[in-house]
Image: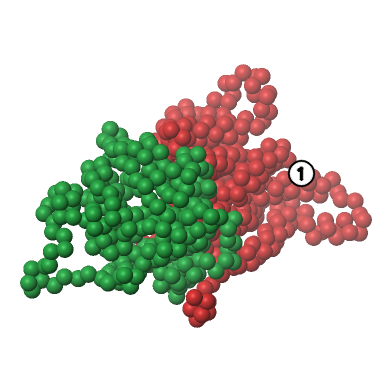
Amino acid sequence: MAAVLEDLPAVPDRMARARALHWGLAGLLVLACIASLETGATGVSLSGVATRLVQGVELTRTERVVLYDIRLPRLAMGLLVGAALAVSGAVMQGLFRNPLADPGLVGVGAGAGLGAILAIVLGAALPGWLLGLTGNQLTPFAAFLGGWASTLLLYRVSTRQGRTSVATMLLAGIALGALAGAVSGILVYVADDRQLRDLTFWGLGSLAGASWIKVLAAGPLILLALGAAFALGRGLNGLALGEATAAHIGIDVQRMKSVAILAVAAATGAAVAVSGGIGFIGIVVPHLLRLASGPDHRTLLPNAALLGATLLILADVIARVAIAPAELPIGIVTAILGAPVFLWILLKRRGLVAP
Amino acid sequence: MSLVAEEIRVAYGRREAVRGVGLVALAGHVTAIVGPNGSGKSTFLGALTGSLPFRGTVILNGRDIATLKPWQQAAERAVLPQATHLAFPFTVIEVVRLGLQSGIAGARSDVPMRALARVGLAHHAGRSFQDLSGGEAQRVMLARVLAQVWEPVAEGRPRWLLLDEPVSSLDIAHQVQVMEIARSFARAGGGVVAVMHDLNLTALHADRILVLCEGRRLAFGAPSEVLTSDILSRAYGCNLGVSVPPPPGVPYVLPHAASL
């Protein structure tokens, strides 16, 4: 038998390629972070500040505020949100066994959107003590609650006798999305001009509202969810063979599905709450990585976190410099860059474009 | 050591597809399950593998499978499904590696490659699984299953291959190859339970045959006892001759098993 094996052509080791990619992406992420700290509406630059720090010269008050209170929290939020969206996308695609699945499918998007709209349009009507409780963070808080509530509802609807049907969850998600859309429509109809403007900008997504408070609120949740997601690699690989076969090779499928859904709800819910609607990261990032180093989730998930964070931070840099001193909503940037890539994926799947 | 099923009942909604079927399969044997379409063969196997909810008991190597965790069952038996739709573009060797239990063999093990060589597909290791023909995909799945229970006997207990129509999409040469792999697994001390359609192939390779009809057990025993004109005609509801020479001038093809 050994002699037979020695004559075989070498098989490309995609696992090794994925690990090499890991370091490449980490390097890229560092560069993106530097670019993010360097650019902005004011003249403050990282290189200038670094030189002054090395020379032992005090930073000016402006420099401190720009760096510590504006750019650093914005960078941290970009890291968290980008990683959360990309990893959530990869997990959803593994769970639904479909490379075009998206966290929006499990109702997080629709629920979070409805929560945000409720907060923006009806927030002023809330009793004062409730408003005081959330400070000026009512919209992200409501978005998070909405995302969670809808996910848990869908999960309950699609689970019978301890077994969750992902197909039912998908269909129920579509129904819930339509319902949320209708309620949102009513609210948009009664909203005044200022509220409409807020709604539009929330829907387009932005990291502009970044603050350390938001980072501290969303950060632990996202990190916890990412940690749980990274442990799902082998299970999601098995699930690619179908649920029955995954169980046959020793995977506790139901437990894995529960962990996956809760992790995605937590990560996406927190990300959408602090940054609004940012699309395409969750679909484009995992797809590019599958092309580069194969679909093995054990490497795909960590690499998705790195690439997702990198792309979102770079998109944020573009959003800040494209029409400076004004800012583009980042959702516009990711959509302009992501939608053509998404179309290209669809065409390639139909075999119209050579790989 | 054995695989024992008692009074198995499986219902789809109100319709009971398997109505109180029992089976004793011994290690060292190839046990075949045959019967007409809709007789409950695959459903019965689904109960043995624990993938369908059922009433009754399945005892695998002396332990009730209801008390075993998925990974404990996976260490003792591997299951070949009828067909597999793979969701992502894994390569052939990556698919075979999915069968490995992380505990018993690491990614560097040569077991997956040897399993692929066993089904004659080692030179396709780097191809995308999704580009394979139906028959090749079926053999790659068999290699994955073999990689999962590579040693027919481990820790003094036989391991089991549960195969759902393992030769359904294969040409005649590969049908013989797959059945001989099953035979040699049993000869080495493992247990094999296979749902079969081809009665002649079953006659050549099975030690025991369970005949199902309308969800009930019609017969169980050695091929010579079970594959009779009477039993088969009753099971399939049409006239079937056994060991009757074909009419003059009608060619008749029967593979010769190397192990006979």
What hue does chain B carry in this figure?
Answer: green
Which residue is found at the position 53% from the left and 41% from the top?
A255
Q: Residue at x 46, y 32 (%)?
A: A156
What amino acid type is highlighted by mark number 1? Answer: Asp
> Viewer-proximal residue, B139 or A95?
B139
**Relative depth, front residue between A246 and B229:** B229
Indicate whether B24 appears above or below A197. below
x and y, in percent, of residue A326 in the image: 64, 49
Is A233 displayed left or right of A177 in the figure? right
Q: Residue furthest right?
A: A56
Chain drawn red in the picture:
A
The relative height of residue A89 versus residue B143 in the rendered view (above or below) is above
Q: Secondary structure at mark 1?
A: helix
Circle 1 sits on which residue? A69
Query: In the rendered image, which quarter is residue B12 located in?
Result: top left
In the rendered structure, the residue with mark 1 lies on which chain? A
- Residue drawn where x is 31% and y is 55% of the image: B208
Q: Is residue B49 left or right of residue A236?
A: left
Residue A216 seen anywhere in this rendered image of the structure: yes
Can you say whether A192 is above or below B180 in the image? above
Say if residue A200 shows up in the picture: no
Q: Is residue B138 left or right of residue A12?
A: left
Residue at left offset 49%, top offset 75%? A1
In which quarter of the view is residue B120 placed? bottom left
Task: From the top left corner, tell me how far across and down residue B252 is, in percent.
Answer: 16, 70
Instruction: Using the image as rendered, state which of residue B103 and residue A155 is in the foreground.
Output: B103
